[in-house]
Image (cartoon, rainbow, N blue to C red):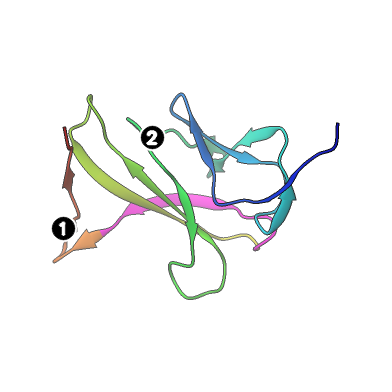
Amino acid sequence: MSQTRRRWMGPVLIAGALVLPTRSAADLILGPGELVQAGGVDIAVPGYSVPSFVLWDGDALPDLVVGQGGAADPEGKVRVYRNVGASTQPAFTDYFYVQSAGSDLIVPGGG
């Protein structure tokens, strides 16, 4: 059985843990994943999330944008993990919340 090449669109959230394929984000062969870490700790977010790589801060490195919230936490927020590594080997430290008018942007959960 041959492996299929696909354009990777971002990480995957499985049971509250963030999982990335083990290859770079450009063109890759989908296979086993690995937990994504920030500051040496596995990234875990409350609730359901659809994380994405985005060019957030203009340094040409893909940063990780992760939503958080759900039944346990009805206030939805958006986390940004700045890439302090390289485009082919991203590395993340801490996150900050996206803000609007000086306060964390809060998106109420929808029913």
Q: Is residue 44 above or below residue 88?
A: above
Most distant residue in the front direction: 1
Residue drawn at the location 20% of the way across and 54% of the way down = 104
Specify the amino acid type for callout 1: Ser
From the top left corner, tell me how far across and down residue 105 is, in percent. 20, 54
Q: Secondary structure at mark 1?
A: strand
Residue assigned mark 2: 45
Specify the quadrant that holds the C terminus. Answer: top left
The quadrant of the rendering that contains the N terminus is top right
Q: Percent from the top left, x then y, of residue 83?
A: 54, 59
Please state the horizontal and vertical placement of residue 14, each as a whole percent of the image.
50, 28
Height in image: 84 above or below 13? below
Instruction: Using the numbered discs, state the Cα–Cα distance from disc 2 to disc 1 in whole angstroms.
Output: 20 Å
Name the residue carrying label 1: 103
Point out the residue furthest to the right here. 1
Q: Is residue 94 magenta?
A: yes
Depth check, front residue: 62 or 109: 109
Which badge, 2 or 1, is on the more N-terminal residue? 2
Amino acid beneath label 2:
Val
Span highlighted in magenta in the image? 87-98
Residue depicted at x 73% and y 36%: 31
Q: Is residue 100 left or right of residue 68?
A: left
Vertical arrangement, residue 55 with respect to residue 78, above or below: below
As helix, strand or loop, the secondary structure at mark 2 comes to loop
70 horizontally vs 62: left or right: left
Q: Residues within 10 Å of mark 1 (few under 14, many from 20)?
A: few
Along the horizontal axis of the image, is 47 left or right of 35?
left
